Image (spheres, helix red, strand yellow):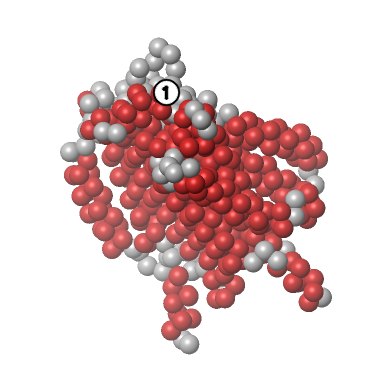
Amino acid sequence: MDTFGLFNYWVVVFLMMTGFYVVIASSNLVKKIVGLNLFQASVFILYISMSSVKGGSAPILEEGVTLYSNPLPHVLILTAIVVSVATTALGLAIVVRIREAYGTVEEDEIHRQDESL
Amino acid sequence: MIQNPVLRVVSKLIIPLILLFALYVQFHGDYGPGGGFQAGVLFASGFILYAMVFGTRAVHKVAPLWIWRPLVATGLFLFIGVGFVSLLFGKPYLDYDALAQEPLVGQHIGVFLVELGIGITVAAVMIVIFLAFAGRNQ
Amino acid sequence: MTELLNVVLLGFLALTALAAIRLRDLFAVVMMFSIFSLLSASLFVVMGAVDVAFTEAAVGAGVSTVLMLETLSLTVRRERPPAHRKLLPLLVVTVTGAALIYGTFDMPKFGDPNAPIHHHVVTRYIEASPQEIGIPNVVTEVLASYRGFDTLGELAVIFTAGVGVMALLGTRSRRRKENRR
């Protein structure tokens, strides 16, 4: 058991870094947004991992249950997930407008068009 | 618009259930998993499914944009308004004890209204965002 | 059993994320992201966060995916292959990742009931809430009552994002087009 004590956090770091890699290495704007979402999802998993208690049940009060997992990170992440979809939609809307203005969603081509102005 | 008859029939059967389940999640969220955020997204996804299968024109016919756009703000104003009601009764902002004689009843009313506000705004925002993207596509 | 499920789901998540990096077809990338969301929702159920799992399944696997597909239909389906190999990003990512892994060694072990996070304000939320609020679902009562201000702010963010999308994309494009005809 003890060897897996930090396993969750390591996988979270790995997922976070895949998202980070997509954001900085990919030049396609849609893929960048997918990368940002991966990064975000890894933060969600980090918080929920921290909230988990061994043998704890879901935080809905019931007679005879004394051990619950921590509800506070659940609240924070619950709202963060819905906020994330709203902000993702905003990012995607900006991508759509960029495509209409430049005719491309590749970052380097957009820079080239900007420089040739 | 999708012509596949299986998809059309099945989604017609499922959409009322999705909307009903969204309402259940909204109003039963105090006792089980659920609440305004989940209910809003579920409610919107019912309409999004309808738009994907039957076309956005059908959604505009059922529930035109002029219904959704004011609702985006209505939910937020409901939330803010509940806070001001407690201010009027001389309690701190968003302290629901002020909403009824019994503090526990007041808390229940407050949580219910706030969750309703969250549900309305989230559902309306999701539908408006979807229709904005779909409107570009035509 | 729970530990095994946990490890298997985390492994699948890592694989899906890797596949999302390597694929060039953006449709497939978006589908991978959808699968990723569904897997993380299952992981949340395993860890006892049912409300969060519910939201993630509805939002991540549902609405987010639909919006990304809509964007693909408005832009392009395929990513252009990169002009040169990207070694610098890989280096940056490895160094940052190593630093973060080093940071995890001070974290409390997974599922440890004695971790500081479980002994701050949360004990009061669980123990005093039947007398103070009287709703069985602790997540709902913390969300709506104890942390009402927080939620109000989040709702304002969602509202603002919705207004932003409306401003950027316009909700009346069809009527304008018909007028032009």
Q: Residue furthest top?
A: A64
Q: Give the side of residue A32 with respect to residue B66, left or right.
A: left
- Residue found 38% across the figure and 19% down from its top: C1
Circle 1 packing at 10 Å, graded few (<14), some (14-19), many (20+), is: some
In the depicted structure, whether residue C142 falls above or below residue C17:
above
- Label 1 sits on what residue type? Pro
Q: How many marks?
A: 1
Q: Nearer the viewer, residue B106 or A31?
A: B106
Q: Quadrant of residue B112?
A: top right
- Residue found 57% across the figure and 47% down from its top: B78
Q: Position of residue C4 (x, y in %)?
A: 36, 24
Residue wearing tag 1: C130
- Residue found 59% across the figure and 59% down from its top: C71
Q: Position of residue C178 (x, y in %)?
A: 80, 71
Q: Is residue A23 visible?
A: yes
Q: Is residue C36 visible?
A: no
> To which chain does the residue with label 1 belong?
C
Q: Give the side of residue A99 with respect to residue B131, left or right.
A: left
